[in-house]
Image (cartoon, rainbow, N blue to C red):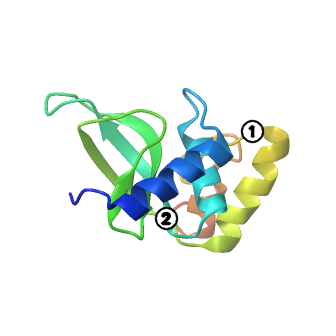
Amino acid sequence: MDALTDDERELVADAIQATKPRESACFANALQLWGYDSRFKYTEGFALASDFDVGGLEHAWCMLDGEKLVDVTTTFAHYHGAIIANEDTLQQHLDMGEVHGIYGVVGNHRNQFEFLRDQGYLDGRSE
């Protein structure tokens, strides 16, 4: 993965100062970066500490300009996920999260996987 340029590092530093990432709040941290600057692409999936981890952890991070990984919560050895590009969905989660907390888009159990149902991956079941 390409290293950040000096200008990109400055953007990340400014974003960190503005959003004040919290420990153990990866979904909120990544979504707030997206809200800070559209160059941060909200990404959700799984992260692994090493090649030997089984399963990984549900996690969120950003891809700067869709290419360079930016994780302001913690650092993992491996990331596997997808950029969520639907701006309406992201804005809804950001707005709702300011009141109720941010729990992720894809794996959000609290809203009974609304995003996955809306995308046609679930047939309306709440399991």
- Name the residue tied to disc 1: 101
83 relative to 72, above or below? below
Q: Amino acid at mark 2?
A: Lys
The x and y percentages for residue 77 are 23, 37
Residue 3 drawn at (x, y percent): 25, 56
**Residue position marked by numbered label 2 in the rendering:** 41
Instruction: Name the secondary structure under disc 2.
Output: strand
Question: Compared with residue 51, is residue 38 higher up or lower down, i.e. above or below?
Answer: below
Is any atom of residue 123 visible in this view? no
- Asked whether the beta carbons under mark 2 and mark 1 sit within 8 Å of each other, the answer is no
Residue extending furthest left? 51
Residue at image position (58%, 54%) is 33
Q: Nearer the viewer, residue 53 or 26?
A: 26
Secondary element at tag 1: loop
Q: Amino acid at mark 1?
A: Gly
Mark 2 or mark 1, whichever is nearer to me: 2
